[in-house]
Image (spheres, grey):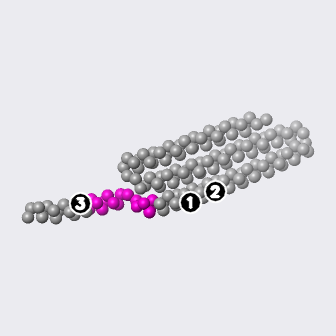
């Protein structure tokens, strides 16, 4: 009789605990959907950043062409303006390239984080840390590349 009473108390507790644990993890199909959505979002963000970069580069090149035409019509002052416009074009291109690199890095991180959702505990923590570290490395490279290009544009003849 005592075993039956204990059993009737333990079974519901075990069932509740199992349901609670099952609710902690995302299902693999939900994670797959989240990863797909994150990839689509990242792809869209990178495409938008690339389009903005392309437009910035086109605008900068138009300014260079205008300055070159003015240079052809004048001498020293046109040369100075051409140099300034070319320097500004290099700077604008560096900033646009940076935006594309950051959008791409953010997209990669978002996808990686979605993949981590299927994990638990220390594995999930390690997975999220790896995603953050990858983003930080990509961001550092993008900053270094941008800064080098900005420095080059500032020193443009």
Vertical comparison of 157 with 66: above or below: above
What's the magenta region? 16-31
Position of 114 with respect to 23 (left or right) is: right
Residue, x 52% and y 44% (percent of image)?
A: 134
* Crowd tier of the residue under label 2, counting other residues whose Cα lies within 10 Å: few below 14, some 14–19, many 20 or above: some
- Cα separation, mark 1 vs mark 2, equals 10 Å
Q: How crowded is mark 3: few (under 14 residues within 10 Å), some or many (20 or more)?
A: few
Q: Quadrant of the C terminus?
A: top right
Q: Nearer the viewer, residue 117 or 80?
A: 117
Q: Give the dominant element type of the magenta stretch: helix, strand or loop.
A: helix
Q: Are marks 3 and 2 in contact (CB under 8 Å)?
A: no
> Which numbered disc covers residue 40?
1
Asked whether disc 1 touches disc 2, contact meaning CB atoms under 8 Å apart, the reply is: no
Q: Name the residue at 11% across, 61% down.
A: 3
Answer left or right for 66 relative to 4. Answer: right
Q: Name the residue under label 2.
A: 47
> In what element is the residue under mark 2?
helix
Q: Quadrant of the N terminus?
A: bottom left
Disc 3 element: helix
């Amino acid at each position: 009789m005592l075993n039956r009473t204990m059993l009737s108390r333990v079974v519901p507790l075990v069932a509740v605990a199992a349901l609670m644990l099952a609710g902690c993890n995302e299902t693999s199909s939900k994670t797959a959907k989240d990863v797909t959505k994150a990839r689509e979002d990242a792809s869209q963000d990178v495409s938008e950043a690339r389009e903005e970069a392309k437009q910035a580069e086109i605008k900068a090149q138009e300014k260079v062409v205008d300055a070159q035409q003015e240079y052809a019509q004048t001498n020293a002052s046109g040369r100075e303006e051409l140099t300034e416009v070319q320097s500004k074009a290099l700077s604008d291109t560096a900033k646009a390239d940076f935006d594309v690199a950051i959008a791409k890095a953010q997209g990669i991180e978002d996808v990686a984080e979605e993949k981590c959702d299927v994990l638990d505990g220390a594995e999930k923590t390690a997975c999220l840390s790896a995603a953050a570290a990858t983003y930080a490395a990509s961001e550092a490279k993008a900053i270094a590349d941008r800064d080098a290009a900005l420095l080059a544009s500032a020193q443009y003849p």
